[in-house]
Image (cartoon, helix red, strand yellow):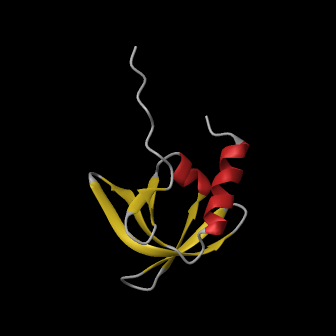
Amino acid sequence: MICKSDIVNLKTGIDEMIGQKIIVKGSLGRNKSFEKEAIIEKAYPNIFVVKYEENERNVTYSYTDVLTRTVEVQVFDGQNYSPLIPPPVAVVK
C-alpha cells in the first residue's frame, strides 16, 4: 500500500533532482516497452515533468506511477544509473 509519506518523500527527492539526467522505462501495452533518456524539468504537487532528449518533448508522470512501478526511473549520478526506488525484496517463506 502506498502511504502519503511515500509520496511526500518521493516528491522531495525529485524536487532535489531537477535538471538531472534520468532514464525512464515503461510499458506501452501488448508486450511493448520503452526506455528513453530524459531530464527532470519541474516538480508539482501531484506530477513531475521530464523532457525527452531524443525529441525535446515534455511528458508528465505522477508520483504514484513511480511508486506502483508503472514507470521505472533510473537516475544518473555522473558515472552510473541507479534506480530511484530500489527493487522490492522478495520474502522467502
Total tally of numbered discs in the picture: 0
Percent x, y for residue 9? 67, 52
Residue 5 appears in which quarter of the rendering? top right
Q: Is residue 48 above or below residue 6?
A: below
Query: Which quadrant of the view contains residue 89?
Result: top left
Residue 56, picture quadrant: bottom left
Does 67 appear above or below 12?
above
Instruction: From the viewer's perspective, tell me whether residue 28 is left or right of residue 61.
Output: left
Image point 36% across, 82% down: which residue?
54
Residues 54 and 28: in front is: 54
- The front one of 19 and 60 is 19
Residue furthest to the top in view is 93
Q: Where residue 44 sits in the image (x, y, percent)?
A: 70, 68
Find residue 36 and report its horizontal and vertical position in percent.
Answer: 36, 70
Q: Is residue 33 depicted above or below 93 in this figure?
A: below
Q: Position of residue 28 (x, y in %)?
A: 35, 59
The residue located at (40%, 82%) in the rendering is: 53
Q: Residue shown at 71%/52% (left/top)?
A: 8
Identify which residue is drawn at 39% across, 73% down.
37
Quadrant in which the N terminus is drawn: top right
